[in-house]
Image (cartoon, grey):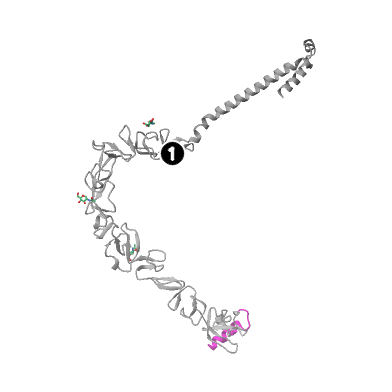
């Protein structure tokens, strides 16, 4: 050792710039920081000189009170914020993930991270997980040990155990989940489980109705469910029915005859005893109240102002009026000019003469006025004729002076009328 030191000293010499900058001026025996005679700052355990120990990345092995050289160790690379020792369990906190008390760069198989903490995947997962939901995929299992699928083989969820795979379910094999137990729901129309999942032909019993080999929610519109809830065909005369005979129709394609007990029979022509047809295509023995039969035996409603029937659909065809009768027609009320007299609108007394004679009165008045005017004019003319010679010039003068005469004529006329 002494020999080596001597030879190195002689080889490199003190204070030479070939030493690492972490060496003191005393020198070194080689170019690396591990070959200093003494360290300028701190040293690692193996004697390598380092810059002052950095608490982010180092822990102190040998402190000094006098500002001398400290010996420090490097933290594990999974640490962040410093450490208390060299291992990944000595970190102040973890750079990546934490499993138990130590730091790691990723969670183990069968674990998933919650923040930086690795948690064990739940028991229902196989092949790892990304969460603890009962799902396959994000936030759930990569695969689950027991898969629940619906009757159409759609994934529903991961099961904790097969305990719930009993009534209404069936354990099956599925190519989609070769490494899992698969529990499949029976068809929703099944009751009491099924022998085959998939369609409703595998049901032990039907929940609602049975049609042939299938369980169905409802019978078709041309069927009815019998006492055993088996769908049976309606009588061919029916469109819809609630039982099997031709009197059990609930809806007809064409005409219908209503029977006792709410029964109904479908017909293509009304039978003799029910010759008339309602607007609902029902054959009846007689048209109902306040309707009349039209030429084609159809019962049509009377006008709403009719009562007790009618001859036609107008308010003039009523047998009796619901309210009042005006000029042969049934109306809701008499007009103002009329009075209701035992259901018939009759002209009021105060209107009787006046409306018709009013024009006559005016005519008489005008005639009298005209006569008076004529009489006055006649009197004036007579008076003028008597006074004439005093005011008027002789005939010759009248001829020679037309204009003047005309003027005086006009004056006279004016006087006469006034
Ligand atoms: C089933 O398991 C085998 C063996 O573990 C594996 O190779 C295969 O990928 C798995 N299949 C599925 C669909 O998970
Ligand atoms: C249907 O008909 C059967 C036998 O004709 C009868 O027993 C049953 O009560 C009827 N059902 C209905 C809903 O009318
Ligand atoms: C309705 O019947 C009344 C009374 O029989 C008759 O006067 C009237 O003309 C009829 N109206 C029509 C449109 O047939």
Viewer-closest of 388 and 396: 388
Percent x, y of residue 343: 40, 38
**Residue 156 inside the magenta-drawn segment:** no
Q: Main secondary structure of the magenta part?
A: helix
Q: Quadrant of residue 110?
A: bottom left
- Place of residue 103 in the rendered image (x, y in percent of width and height, measured from the top left): 46, 76
Which part of the image, by quadrant, shows the C terminus? top right
Which residues make up the magenta segment?
Answer: 1-18
> Can residue 403 be seen at all in this image of the molecule?
no
- Quickly name the residue at label 1: 340
User: Measuring 45% from the left and 38% from the top, which residue is drawn there?
Assistant: 339
- Residue 264 % position (x, y): 25, 44
Q: Is residue 384 visible?
A: yes
- Image quarter for ligand 3 equals top left
The reply, left or right, for residue 51 in relation to residue 300 is right
Residue 6: in magenta span: yes
Q: Residue at x 44, y 79 (%)?
A: 101
In this figure, what is the number of numbered marks?
1
- Of residues 268 and 151, the one nearer the viewer is 268
Q: Residues within 10 Å of mark 1 (few under 14, many from 20)?
A: some
What is the quadrant of residue 12 in the picture? bottom right
> Which corner quadrant of the image does residue 150 belong to?
bottom left
- 230 to 330, vertically: above or below: below
Q: Nearest the camera: 214 or 242? A: 242
As displayed, is residue 131 above or below residue 212?
below
């Amino acid at each position: 050792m002494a020999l080596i030191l001597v030879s190195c000293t002689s080889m490199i010499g003190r204070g030479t710039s070939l030493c690492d900058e972490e060496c003191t001026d005393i020198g070194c025996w080689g170019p690396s920081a591990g070959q200093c005679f003494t360290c300028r700052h701190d040293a690692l355990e193996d004697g390598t000189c380092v810059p002052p120990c950095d608490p982010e990345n180092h822990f102190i092995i040998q402190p000094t009170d006098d500002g001398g050289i400290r010996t420090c160790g490097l933290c594990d690379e999974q640490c962040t914020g410093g450490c208390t020792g060299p291992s990944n369990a000595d970190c102040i906190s973890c750079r990546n993930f934490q499993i138990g008390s130590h730091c790691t760069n990723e969670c183990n198989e069968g674990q998933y991270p919650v923040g930086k903490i690795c948690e064990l995947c739940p028991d229902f997962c196989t092949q790892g997980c990304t969460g603890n939901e009962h799902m396959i995929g994000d936030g759930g299992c990569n695969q689950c040990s027991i898969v629940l699928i619906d009757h159409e083989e759609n994934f529903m969820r991961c099961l904790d155990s097969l305990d719930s795979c009993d009534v209404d379910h069936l354990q099956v094999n599925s190519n989609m989940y070769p490494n899992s137990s698969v529990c499949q729901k029976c068809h929703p129309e099944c009751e009491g489980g099924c022998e085959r999942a998939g369609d409703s032909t595998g049901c032990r019993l039907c929940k609602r109705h049975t049609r042939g080999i299938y369980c169905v929610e409802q019978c078709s519109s041309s069927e009815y469910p019998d006492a055993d809830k088996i769908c049976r065909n309606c009588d061919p005369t029916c469109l819809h029915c609630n039982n099997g005979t031709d009197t059990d129709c609930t809806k007809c394609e064409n005409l219908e005859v209503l029977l006792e007990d709410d029964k109904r029979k479908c017909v293509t022509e009304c039978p003799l005893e029910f010759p008339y047809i309602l607007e609902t295509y029902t054959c009846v023995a007689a048209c109902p109240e306040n309707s009349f039969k039209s030429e084609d035996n159809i019962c049509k409603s009377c006008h709403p102002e009719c009562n007790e029937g009618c001859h036609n659909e107008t308010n003039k065809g009523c047998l009796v009026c619901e309210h009042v009768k005006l000029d042969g027609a049934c109306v809701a009320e008499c007009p103002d000019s009329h009075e209701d007299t035992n259901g018939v609108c009759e002209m009021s007394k105060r209107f009787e003469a006046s409306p018709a004679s009013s024009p006559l009165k005016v005519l008489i008045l005008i005639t009298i006025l005209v006569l008076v005017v004529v009489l006055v004019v006649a009197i004036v003319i007579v008076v003028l004729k008597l006074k004439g010679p005093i005011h008027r010039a002789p005939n010759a003068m009248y001829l020679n002076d037309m204009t003047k005469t005309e003027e005086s004529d006009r004056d006279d006329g004016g006087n006469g009328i006034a």
